[in-house]
Image (cartoon, rainbow, N blue to C red):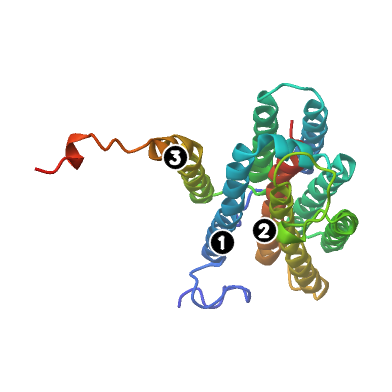
């Protein structure tokens, strides 16, 4: 071990150097994101099939969604993605204070997203616009409007779970930042959480027009 | 030890991408209120793809990183496209099979004739 004396403490013993460790972590993260894309992919394919079979019903049923709330949530999530990217940028410049601030902002935006989603969900539950056999609403023309709400709740629900998990992940790196575990040389966990958070944002970018902006 | 080679993106780039994403969001909402017939979904998906590419290339650093990550990302999209296209070929053409099945059997056909 010729470089044993110069090895930084954050490099695990099975990696040659910090560079290799970083690249390996990123490769693993991207493979995980690939499985996430395919997981949501199944739901997107289900959406495609049912929309192609029931174009009229999808158009009528999507009017039950609030475009204003959907637009606000899109803006909130995009802004949270921006603050996440800026938190990593701050750590690259060794600006710990800014990283903490941007991570907190990301957490707050994620919380706002979930609160708005909660109001949307509770309104639909009240009206009985629910999936499958729980559907009791009568105001939507066309056959089987419950299919739209099955897809709506499955897609936004899985996405919402990802937002909740993302908040735990952001809190985890925030705690590590507060404990001074990161520096401009080592911030890989923040970067990985960032990649995950951007993917959650990216999925919402597709969910929003497909569910809220039909025709 | 190798020098730190990580690309540091200027804040200006992040802000420009963020603002572009917000503008594209407003455009996609505005366009959805104009009736373009079947092209509404096309326009919405083109704008969404553009936004997703902006997020992937700049927020997720694909633009500066090892191209291996781009290959993984593109690979997932490729297989998702195959999944979607082949499934839709099936579900969108079942109607004609059902029509074929519904046709009455011709008992006069040679295959039903006993010797």
Circle on res. A196: 2
The Cα–Cα distance between marks 3 and 2, rounded to whole angstroms, is 44 Å
Label 3 element class: helix
Category of crowding for the residue at label 3, using alpha-carbon neighbours closer than 10 angstroms: few (below 14), some (14–19), many (at least 20): few
For residue A52, side relative to residue A61 (left or right): left
Q: Which-is-in-front pick, marks 3 and 2? A: 3
Circle on res. A32: 1
Circle on res. B41: none
CB contact under 8 Å: marks 1 and 2: yes
Category of crowding for the residue at label 2, using alpha-carbon neighbours closer than 10 angstroms: few (below 14), some (14–19), many (at least 20): many
The Cα–Cα distance between marks 1 and 3, rounded to whole angstroms, is 41 Å
Q: Which-is-in-front pick, marks 1 and 3? A: 3
CB contact under 8 Å: marks 3 and 2: no
Residue B78: x, y in percent?
48, 43
Residues at marks 1 and 2 on the same chain:
yes
Q: Is residue A184 visible?
A: no
Residue B19: x, y in percent?
81, 36
Q: Chain of mark 1?
A: A
- What residue is pinned by disc 3? B98
Q: Residue furthest left?
A: B115
Determine the residue positioned at 74% across, 30% down: A215
Residue A149: x, y in percent?
74, 51
């Amino acid at each position: 071990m010729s470089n044993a004396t110069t090895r930084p403490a954050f490099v695990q013993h099975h990696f040659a150097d910090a560079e290799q460790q970083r690249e390996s972590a990123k490769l693993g993260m991207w493979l995980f994101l690939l499985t996430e894309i395919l997981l949501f992919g199944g739901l997107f394919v289900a959406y495609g099939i049912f929309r192609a079979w029931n174009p009229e019903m999808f158009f009528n049923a999507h009017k039950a969604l609030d475009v204003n709330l959907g637009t606000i949530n899109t803006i909130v999530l995009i802004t949270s993605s921006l603050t996440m990217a800026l938190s990593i940028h701050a750590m690259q410049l060794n600006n710990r204070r800014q990283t903490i601030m941007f991570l907190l902002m990301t957490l707050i935006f994620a919380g706002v997203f979930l609160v708005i989603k909660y109001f949307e969900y509770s309104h639909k539950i009240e009206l009985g616009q629910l999936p499958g056999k729980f559907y009791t609403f009568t105001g939507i023309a066309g056959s089987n409007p419950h299919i739209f709400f099955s897809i709506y709740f499955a897609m936004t629900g899985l996405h919402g779970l990802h937002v909740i998990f993302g908040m735990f992940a952001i809190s985890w790196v925030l705690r590590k930042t507060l404990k001074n575990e990161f520096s401009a040389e080592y911030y890989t966990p923040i970067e990985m959480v960032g990649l995950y958070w951007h993917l959650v944002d990216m999925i919402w970018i597709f969910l929003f027009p497909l569910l809220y902006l039909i025709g | 030890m190798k020098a730190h080679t990580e690309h540091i993106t200027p804040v200006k780039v992040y802000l420009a991408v963020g603002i572009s994403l917000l503008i594209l969001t407003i455009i996609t909402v505005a366009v959805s209120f104009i009736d373009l017939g079947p092209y509404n979904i096309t326009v919405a998906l083109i704008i969404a793809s553009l936004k997703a590419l902006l997020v992937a290339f700049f927020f997720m650093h694909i633009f500066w990183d090892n191209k291996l990550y781009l290959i993984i990302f593109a690979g997932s999209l490729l297989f998702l496209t195959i999944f979607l296209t082949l499934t839709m070929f099936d579900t969108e053409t079942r109607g004609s099979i059902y029509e074929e099945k519904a046709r009455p059997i011709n008992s006069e056909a040679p295959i039903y004739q006993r010797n």
